[in-house]
Image (spheres, rainbow, N blue to C red):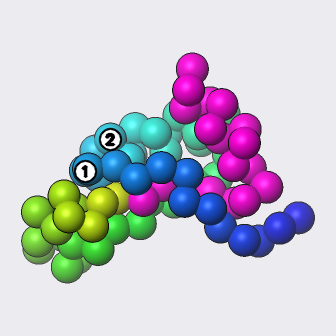
Amino acid sequence: MSEEVFVLRVFNNEIDAGIAKELLQDGGIRSFVLKDDAGGMEPHLQLTGGVRLVVNRADAEQAHQILER
């Protein structure tokens, strides 16, 4: 099993990324939300840097299919 991560999608905010993360979790896929917004103190940075939804590369195709439903 590959431990390499893959950025599945980039969102404009943490809320949308969290919804997608929950959909993947319901589908049995482990994912993580990565963001750089100064620990939540600068949420506007999410607009410029984006909020990344990351999965294991081996799960990327299945995860993409789940989010496309």
The CA span between labels 2 and 1 is: 6 Å
Q: Say if 6 sits above or below 64 in the image.
A: below
Give the left or right position of residue 64, taking residue 42 as reference: right
Residue 64 in picture, x, y percent from top left? 62, 38
Q: Are marks 2 and 1 in contact (CB under 8 Å)?
A: yes
> Which residue is labeled 2 in the image?
16
> Which residue is labeled 1 in the image?
13
Image quarter (top left, top right, bottom left or bottom right) of the N terminus? bottom right
Q: Determine whether the residue tagged by mark 1 lies in a helix, strand or loop.
A: loop
Residue at (34% x, 59% y) in the render: 51
Q: Decide if residue 28 is in sight here.
A: no
Query: Magenta residues, as a range?
Result: 52-69
Principal secondary structure, stretch drawn in magenta: helix
Identify the amino acid type marked 1: Asn
Residue 43 in picture, x, y percent from top left? 14, 64
Quadrant of the rendered image containing residue 26: top right
Residue at (55% x, 32% y) in the render: 67
Identify the amino acid type marked 2: Asp
Quadrant of the rendered image containing residue 33: bottom left
